Image: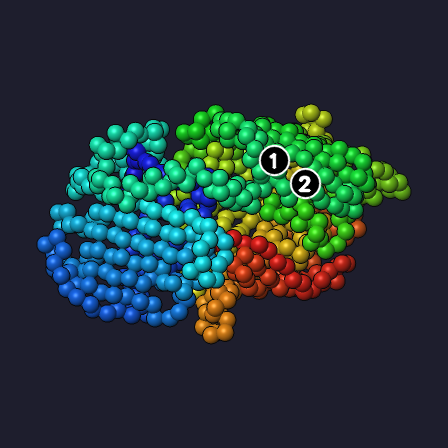
Amino acid sequence: RNEVIKASKVAGVQNTSVSQFMGDMYQNVNIYDNNIIVFGKNFISPISDNALFFYKFYLIDSMVIDGHKCYQLQFKPRRKQELTFTGNLWAADTSFAVKQIEMSIAEDANINFINATNVVQKYIMIDSVWMMEKERLVIDFNPLPVENKKKSTMGIYGRKTASYGSFKINQPKEDRFYSLTENLKVEDDAFKKSDEYWKEHRLDSLSKNEKQIYHMVDTLQSLPIYHTWIDVLQLFITGYKVKGNFEYGPYFNMYSFNEIEGNRFRFGGRTSNQFSKWYELSGYVAFGTKDERFKYSIGLRSFISKNPRTMVGMYYKNDNEILGQSQNGFTTDNILASLFRITPLRNLTNVKQVFFYIDRQWFSGFNTKLSFYNRQMFPLANFSYEYHKTSNTIATKEHITTSEVRVLARLALHEKFIDGAFTRLSLGTPNPIIQAQYTLGIKNLFNSDYNYQKLVLNLEDRIRINPIGYFDYLLECGKVWGQLPYPLLELHGGNETYTYDLYAFNGMNYYEFVSDEYATASISHHFDGFFLNRIPLMRKLKWREVIGGKALIGRVNDKNRELLIFPDHLYDLKRGPYFEANAGIENIFKVFRIDGIWRLSYLDNPRVTPFSFRFSFQFNF
């Protein structure tokens, strides 16, 4: 399949944060698929192979539509709160192909933030092939939880209408047309077409109701309450407050506290889309009342080209980090990290870093990133880099300096995005995501201390298993070549907060395990309420079950132990793999998740808790 979009018109909210809620409106609903993915949920098609297990059908009527005798069938879910539809379909009497279908998500389906939805599809026969002629999708979003659906609240109303015509059957193109890596191309001027263009090329003229919608949108955008609502939603999702050419934030980093810095205050922001949609300046300044030190960062990112998407960036920062912390974890200056930290923050490192990169998407689903880092790492507080100067003498290394080049390649075929001015929102992909990163450390380049190489490979995927939810897995392996001190090896990501970190070992402490050769596995299964929906007293809560587990194996070469003395409570994995398991409930009040974490190995290490609870915030449909 290859698709070229020559013109597109969107009326309404031109805001990336709002588009995150409405993202699936841009995807097609194929009723001939057994499973229809709507807002990340796996709905059963009313004409799936197993439809009779999930639906009740009623023969209502027969009629002639466009010269075809059709039977009208009404369908309803067999059980409450399953991910199913309710509606009517008209099937042709000879081929039993769908001539027309009207359906809505079942009113009690276990899905969030949607008050109502309606899908209408009409098909036409072209040279004995049934083709979709028209599709209408209307969805009433309500991001704010409201139990009484009759109560009036602010929401988002999305409508998509698609008409298809000028079909050409059995006219194959050259092989190159079908082998293109880009199966969807949007022409540069697709969003700039005039009203006259649309009057000439639109297959269906606008109805009176549709014309009123355009007028209503123009009126709505002139109302102050509309802009207030959009600003609040954007502040909540992005953490930034837009004011003219500047965006202030993130608000959750403006104040935090820890044992090393004391009370930390930070002010920063970035230029807004009003300033430029081609380049963005950003930065911040922070100050700690206990260490009485300023920290700061400044950066620039800019497009070289938007088609193909090519971006460059350059940043400098002088700030504190937890080495080895997962990319998904709260930064040390996030107020939530301060509030929900389990143990005092002991192992902060001051990092002075220069960072350059160029990121290019070669085709839809494949991009590469070339980057350069120069880092200086200084231990803080009572922490130090110690080594054996002689057999009887211990000396201290003031700091570690590295210069490295990284090459990252990411393959996610058929991944779809909503593009903001700079940020992209992924709508996901039905295929596995493969990523590889190679790092080359260069000694003496900008005073770098070491030569080394690193390679990290990972694979992640989501497997949908109707009707019992979906299964996620993430596999990763890595290896280091060269002699390096432990801060430059793989410090496995622990978690010392009460919040659940998807990409960390939640039963592990910071700075607990290190490897120069390792492999990890993370699995989880989300049941989407498969069991709880069958318990009458629990059904109305719409809670959803989740279970999972994580494993880690690794080792440290003896030559890497010689450079720096391992601090207390830092270990290798020579006694065997590390294991942990979790089970929990998600969708509590539609936004909370609570997990119980069982640590299953290395229980004799200091400061270990065999069982603990973690919570997280989730905004899922």
Q: Percent x, y for residue 587?
A: 52, 60
Relative to residue 94, is residue 355 depicted above or below? Answer: above
Q: Residue at x 57, y 58 (%)?
A: 592
135 in relation to 599, above or below = above
Residue placed most toward the observer, 472 or 204: 204
Q: Under tag 2, what secondary structure?
A: loop
Would residue 186 appear left or right of 483 to someone viewing this image? left
Mark 1: which amino acid?
A: Tyr
Say which quarter of the image contains residue 578: bottom right
Q: Which residue is mark 1?
A: 248
Image coordinates of residue 210 in percent, x first then y, are 29, 43
- Give the mark nearer the N terminus: 1 vs 2: 1
For disc 2, the marked residue is 254
Q: Quadrant of the N terminus?
A: top left
Looking at the picture, tell me which residue is in the foreground, 265 or 156: 156
In the picture as drawn, the residue positioned furthest to the left comes out as 67
Q: Residue at x 39, y 52 (%)?
A: 140
